[in-house]
Structure formats: C-alpha cells, structure tokens
Image: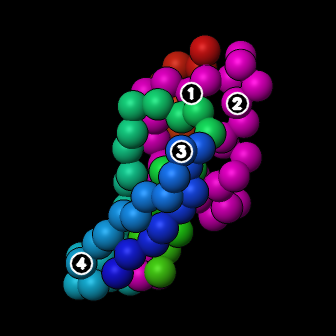
Amino acid sequence: MQASYAKEYGIDTIEIHEDAINENDVILLHDDLLATGGTMKAACDLVKKFHPKKVYANFIIELVNENFEGRKIFDDDVEVSTLLQL
C-alpha cells in the first residue's frame, strides 16, 4: 500500500507491505523533527488504513517558535508527543 503527499518542492510517496500491520497492533511512529508535519501525517494516514488499536506519533523536537503548527494537522485519534519544543 502507498500514500503520496505534497511537499514544498514536489510530491513524495511512502509505502508499506499489506501484511505489515493488523487490527491488534499498537503503532508508534517516531521522527526527529516536527515542523509542518506533512511526512508524518502521510505515514499516520497510511498506517490507519490497517485499523490498528492505536497510533502514536512521537518527535524529539517540535518547532513552535517559527509559526510552525504541525501538530494541528493530525487527526484527534493520533496521540502526538514531543520531548522538546523550540
């Protein structure tokens, strides 16, 4: 399965095997930086197609002081956490 998403300089596509996740799984998606959130939102949307029990998105750093509001693009059922907000 795959999901495509727009970036400021083009379109990217992420992929996952159709048998990678099942309805009993709890998924943690982790990345180093949350700015606009586009890549992680696409990953969350792709994973949610498998209807897992829960999806978490975790970041080391979240940029908030430069008018980035990446956290706001995630659906309410995805729990978003960061270690450090800058």
At label 3, which amino acid type do we have? Tyr
- Does residue 43 sit above or below 32 in this rendering? below
- Does residue 4 sit above or below 56 in this rendering? below
Is residue 64 inside the magenta stretch? yes
Reading the image, the residue beneath label 2 is 68
Reading the image, the residue beneath label 1 is 62
Residues at discs 1 and 2 in contact (Cβ within 8 Å): yes
At label 2, which amino acid type do we have? Phe
Reading the image, the residue beneath label 4 is 17
1 or 2: mark nearer the eye? 2
- Residue 20 is situated, as x and y percent measured from the top left of the image, at 24, 76
Read off the magenta span.
Answer: 50-79
Is residue 23 inside the magenta stretch? no
Which image quadrant is residue 27 in?
Answer: bottom left
Seen in the image, is 69 located left or right of residue 53? right
- Residue 9 is situated, as x and y percent measured from the top left of the image, at 53, 44
Reading the image, the residue beneath label 3 is 9
